[in-house]
Structures are given as C-alpha cells and as structure tokens.
Amino acid sequence: MAGALEQIPLDGWPFDLAATLGSGQVFHWQAWEGGWVGTIGEEGVFLRQRDPGVLECSAGKAAVVRHYLGLEEDLAAVVAGFPADDEALQRAIAWCPGLRLIRQPAWECLATFITSSLKQVPQIRAISLRLRERLGEVVRLEGMPCVWGYPRAEVIAAAGEEFLRGCGLGYRAAFLHRSAVAVAEGSCDLRAVAGLGDAAALAELCRLHGVGEKVASCVLLFGYGRSGAFPIDVWIERVLRELYFPRARKLTHARLDRFAWKQFGPHRGLAQQFLFHWARLTDCGRRAVGPAGDVMVVG
DNA sequence: TTCCAGGTAACGC
DNA sequence: GCGTTACCTGGA
C-alpha cells in the first residue's frame, strides 16, 4: 500500500510519467506498486500514472510534484514554435509527446551529472543510490519502502575523496569532492546561478573542477529549468550527425551549438530531449519500441 | 583478456 | 583554438 494518495488531473498537452522518469534526466526513482518511489528534494514521494489523464501522488505533495515534473509548462505553445518541416523532430515529438523537462534541485542534479561521465545509465543509477544510502538522510513514509535524499554538499565534502572512491566513483571521486567543498564553503553559490543569464550561469558552473560544458548544460536544463541549454554528449552528437549532417566530415561542438540555435530556437534544450529520448530508444526509428522502453508489436 | 562507456583536465601544437 | 591522452570501474 502506498499510503494516502491524491490525484492530479492532467488536461491539455499529454504527460507520460514513465518516459519522463526514464529519459536520462534522473536516476533514483524505483519501480514499486505500478508506480515509482523516490525523493523530490528532502521529501519522499510515490508517483503513479495508471490512466493517461490522471497522475497519482502521495497526499499533500501535489504542488511539489507539479513543479518537479514541469506540469505548469504550456508545452503546446513551446512545441508549436518548433519548425514544422523538421521531420525528425516532429517524429520524435509524436512518438513521445508526454516527455517533460524535470526541475531537480540544483545540487542533486549537479552532483549526479558529475558522477555520470563515461558511465552507462545503470551505473549512474547504482552510484546515485549508493551515495544516497551511505550519506543521505533516510526518508520513511507510511507503507512505502524507505528512500534516501541526495546527500548535501557539506556531507559529501566531509566524507572525503577516499570514501567516495570506496563508493565506486573512480576518478570522479575527486571531481565530486572538490565541487562539494566549493559549494559547501560558498565559493560556488548555486542559488546565485539562478539569477545569472544562460552564458554567465554556464561559465559559473564550469568553474567547478570536474564540470565541463556538457555537465553544466545538463544542470541548467534539468536543474534550473533553462530550456535553452543544449548539452552535447556522444549520443546527441551521433543523432545530430545522422539526421542533419550525414555527409559532414568533422563536426565541432561549436558548430552543433550554433546549428541548434538556428534550427530549434530558444527552447532547443527541450527539442534535444525529445530527439535524445527517441533516438536512444528507437535507434532513430529503426527499432519498434514504445516511449517507456516497451517493445511494440509491429504490424 | 580486451574493449568500451551519456566527460574533463592537462598537455602539446 | 584544436587535437590527444590519461583517468576508475564494471559489464559485454
């Protein structure tokens, strides 16, 4: 039993919980009772979507959930601004229109992506859960398995680099530790980043050791709600190359960055998320798979 | 065994 | 600026 639940009606643009939680933005939600348990900041929450038009969540958490899942965003208007003649993008959106950008707490998002370098999703997940269990605050909710909040920067700073290595972080241990120290002692102010313009915010995050443009862009996109941030990783690079530059011999990140502005506009980060999710799961449409990873019957 | 994976920093030119 | 290389770890 998942305790008392409340219902969030979903009207207007579709919403797909499974796809949103499984699209590589967050790594800590655990499947349970037909839904997911996890934390939003310090709060334990159960989420479930049995009906496309209704999202269930733990009683009293609706406001937090709505913000976290970006349900207030008028996606119809944003999507209408994408180029109608961009076949790949339109196909990606049609395949999974219910995908949303999550608004994670900044530190949790930053720390998680610092630990993601050269790791596959299941490993990023394992590291995230391990850090939570060993250093985070346990959250007990009536009738739910217990979950852990992401450890605060001060706690990771105090734990030390060697402890983090012991959690399987490898060379990322130094990155995470140094960043935690900077955030904990205030030489990097994650709240102040929210008040900066996109370029300044990116530069501020990149001052942290272990944070380059890719990680910083992910944090702006998934942690600060900046839908204009455009992280370029090996996946999206592969996808953009295949779809838009099949014959180019060399493609610099700077060129892809300029292209994304021109092609997708101010919400290019959201466009990227649609393309990324579609391309990764369907191999650019070559594989018959549904938006939550389920195999579809071809016919 | 060997290779590779959702990146970054530090070097060389 | 642009290209290379080392870096931990776990799974194929």
Image (cartoon, coloured by chain):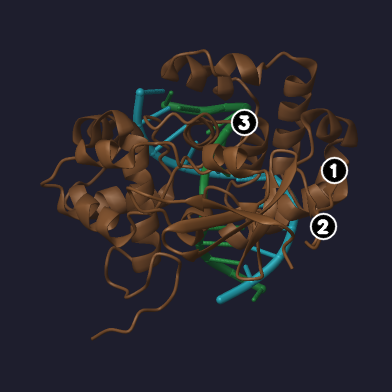
Chain colours: A brown, B green, C cyan
Residue A172, horizontal then vertical, whole percent: 70, 42
Closer-to-camera residue (A182/A198): A198
For the residue labelled by badge 1, is the local secondary structure a helix, a strand or a loop? loop
3 or 1: tag closer to the N-terminus: 3
Query: What's the CA distance linking mark 3 and mark 2?
Result: 28 Å
Residue A20, horizontal then vertical, whole percent: 48, 53
1 or 2: tag closer to the N-terminus: 1
Q: Which disc, if any, is residue A142?
A: 2
Closer-to-camera residue (A33/A31): A33
Query: What's the CA distance linking mark 3 and mark 1?
Result: 17 Å
- Is there CB contact under 8 Å for labels 1 and 2? no
Q: Which disc, if any, is residue A106?
A: 3
The residue to which callout 1 is attached is: A137
Relative height, residue A173 to residue A133 (above, below):
above
Relative height, residue A37 to residue A177 (above, below):
below
Residue A218, horizontal then vertical, whole percent: 50, 37
